[in-house]
Amino acid sequence: MQLLYSAMSPFARKARVVAFELGLAERLELVPATPYTDESLRAINPLSKIPILVPDAGEPIFDSPVICEYLEHLAGVSLTPASGPERWAALTQQALADGMGDAALAIVRERLRDGDQRQDLFDRQAAALNAALDKLEAEGLSADRFQIGEIAVAAQLAYLDGRKVLDWREGRPNLAAWYETASRRTSMVATAPHQV
Ligand SMILES: N[C@@H](CCC(=O)N[C@@H](CS)C(=O)NCC(=O)O)C(=O)O
C-alpha cells in the first residue's frame, strides 16, 4: 500500500508513527506528494490534502484519523482504548492535536504569502494553539502509553519545532518534559523529516 505524504506534514507523520508502532512501516510505500501545487491529487482526494493511503486493493483512504484506524484494523492491534471515557478522551486528544496542526499550518501558509499578511489570522490561530498547549500542560499526557492521542500530540509538537511556529515550551515544563521522552521513541526518530 502507498502513503501519499510529505516529510514535513504532521498529519502524515502521525500516520507513519502509527504504522511504525503497529509494525506496518515496511508495508507502507512512501510516495511524496505536493498538495498545494499538484492538481492531479484531486482525482484521489477531492480535497487535495495529504496524507492519503492507497491500499493494495480498494478506494483511497483519508484523512489521517481514518488512515490510523485502517492501519489499526490491518494490524489487528488497537492504539485507541476500546470503550468508555478513556476512548473518548483519546479520540478528543487526537482531534485537539489535529486542530493544532490546522492552526499551525494556517500560520505557516500565511507567513509564506506575498504582500500584506493578516494579523487577525495570526492572532486567532496562535490563540487556538496556545489554549490547546495550555490544556495539554495542565492535564498532562500519559508517560506509560504511546497511543493515538499521544502520537497525535507528539507529531504536532514536532511540527511546531520544525516550522518554528512558536516557542511552545515557554511556561510549559510538563509538556516539554513529556515530549523530550516521546521524541526519543524509535517510531518518532525513524519518521523525523531528515530521515526521509
Ligand atoms: N484533517 C486532515 C488535514 C490534512 C492536511 O491539512 N494536510 C495538509 C498538509 S500537512 C494539506 O495537504 N494541505 C493542503 C491544502 O490544505 O490545500 C488530516 O488529518 O489528514
Image (tube, helix red, strand yellow):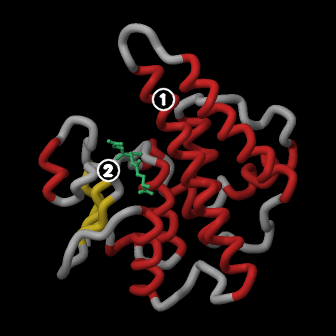
Q: Position of residue 71 (x, y in %)?
A: 42, 78
For mark 2, give the secondary structure: loop
Q: Residue at x 74, y 56 (%)?
A: 181
Query: In the rendered image, which residue does mark 2 sit on?
Result: 49
Q: Is residue 62 above or below residue 5?
A: below
In front: 84, or 184?
84
Q: Residue at x 36, y 72 (%)?
A: 26
Q: Is residue 70 left or right of residue 43?
A: right
Residue ranking furthest to the front: 120
CA–CA distance between discs 2 and 1? Answer: 16 Å
Q: Residue at x 43, y 63 (%)?
A: 64
When asked about the image quadrant of residue 147, the answer is bottom right
Indicate the amino acid at tag 2. Answer: Lys
Packing grade of label 1 (10 A; few <14, some 14-19, many >=20) is some
Q: Is residue 128 left or right of residue 8?
A: right
Q: Position of residue 78 (x, y in %)?
A: 56, 85
Indicate the amino acid at tag 1. Answer: Val
Packing grade of label 2 (10 A; few <14, some 14-19, many >=20) is many
Q: Residue 161, which numbered label?
A: none
Q: Is residue 115 above or below residue 9?
A: above
Q: Residue 108, which numbered label?
A: 1
Q: Position of residue 2 (x, y in %)?
A: 25, 66
Looking at mark 2, is its residue's CB closer than 8 Å to ligand 1?
A: yes
Which of disc 1 and disc 2 is earlier in sequence? Answer: 2
In front: 26, or 172?
172
How many circles with numbers are drawn on the protein?
2
Q: Is residue 20 above or below residue 36?
A: below
Q: Is residue 87 left or right of residue 105?
A: right
For mark 1, give the secondary structure: helix
Residue ranking furthest to the top: 115
